[in-house]
């Protein structure tokens, strides 16, 4: 998959996506990550990318033209353009699964108070990673690119790693344990040591239901199915 980030701060996206699984996915060619910087598309001495908002108000707004030119540099036929903004639709696993099917994603990262609204119609999708305001779209782009990259076939070496996990089946995942069997007096649950596949499955299902009820009562399976259908609609 090819991914481009339109950003004034490419390092903020490049660095966190150079480590661990995503870093390896880049080295192995599963993910080709590029950058386009609006500052490279200015023509004044100060390389200005922002200006005061019309109508007054605090903060600065990113100007349309440098953003537009930076986008045109990377946009091709078939690209999916995503604008990161706290005003966007909430990002979740269902959206990640849809995005993972695309050939080319472009993320537009806003900064300062936001971007000139006339850029918004160029995006296929406006995405928010949660109900809080970040200093810019870059950390949000990192989150989305990370979640999508691990879904690219071949990135996770065990093919079933993304099948049973949290959110995919509409429930949070059951807890995990590893050696030692007793750690500071705390035992690993007997069911997991039993070697009995059915017993382990039942135990995991019960713990998953219990955990979901406690931490995310909104995540009942029918709601998850509806969410998936909605994500499909957003992108078709
Ligand atoms: N930019 C600033 N806050 C954001 C958020 N919560 N999600 C996506 N982009 C953002």
Image (cartoon, grey):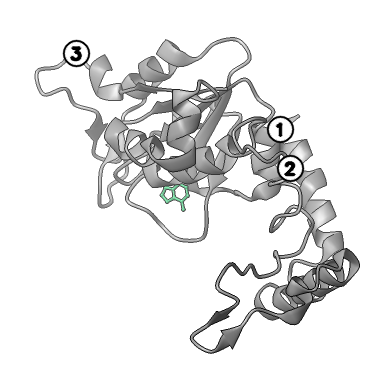
* In this picture, residue 4 sits left or right of residue 155: left
* Quarter location, residue 142: top left
Q: Residue furthest bottom?
A: 185
Numbered disc 2: secondary structure? helix
* Quarter location, residue 80: top right
In which quadrant is the N terminus drawn? Answer: top right
In which quadrant is the C terminus drawn? Answer: top right
Pointer 1 or 3: first along the chain: 3
Residue neighbourhood size for the residue with mark 2, other residues' Cα within 10 Å, grouped as few (<14), some (14–19), many (≥20): many
Mark 1 and mark 3: Cα distance apart in space? 35 Å
Q: Which residue does the numbered mark 3 point to in the structure image?
A: 43
x%, y% of residue 99? 65, 33
Mark 3 and mark 2: Cα distance apart in space? 40 Å
**Residue 219 against residue 233 in the figure, above or below:** below
Residue found at x 56% / y 69%? 179
Residue found at x 78% / y 77%? 191
x%, y% of residue 234? 72, 37
Q: Is the residue indicated by label 2 positioned so its CB lies within 8 Å of ligand 1?
A: no
């Amino acid at each position: 998959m090819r991914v481009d980030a339109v950003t004034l701060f490419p390092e903020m996206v490049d660095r966190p996506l150079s480590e661990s699984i995503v870093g390896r996915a880049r080295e192995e060619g599963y993910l080709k990550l590029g950058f386009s910087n609006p500052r490279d598309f200015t023509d004044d001495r100060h390389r200005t990318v922002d200006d005061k908002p019309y109508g007054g108000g605090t903060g600065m707004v990113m100007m349309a033209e440098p953003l537009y030119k930076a986008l045109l540099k990377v946009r091709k036929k078939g690209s999916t353009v995503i604008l990161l903004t706290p005003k966007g639709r909430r990002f979740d696993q269902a959206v990640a699964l849809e995005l993972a099917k695309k050939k080319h994603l472009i993320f537009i990262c806003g900064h300062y108070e936001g971007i000139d609204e006339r850029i918004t119609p160029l995006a296929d999708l406006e995405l928010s990673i949660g109900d809080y305001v970040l200093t810019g779209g870059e950390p949000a782009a990192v989150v989305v690119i990370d979640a999508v990259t691990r879904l690219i076939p071949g990135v996770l070496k065990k093919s079933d790693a993304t099948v049973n996990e949290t959110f995919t089946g509409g429930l949070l995942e059951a807890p995990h344990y590893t050696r030692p069997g007793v750690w500071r007096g705390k035992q690993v649950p007997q069911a997991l040591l039993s070697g009995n596949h059915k017993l382990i499955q039942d135990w995991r299902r019960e713990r998953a239901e219990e955990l979901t009820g406690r931490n995310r009562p909104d995540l009942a399976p029918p709601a998850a199915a509806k969410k998936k259908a909605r994500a499909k609609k957003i992108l078709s």
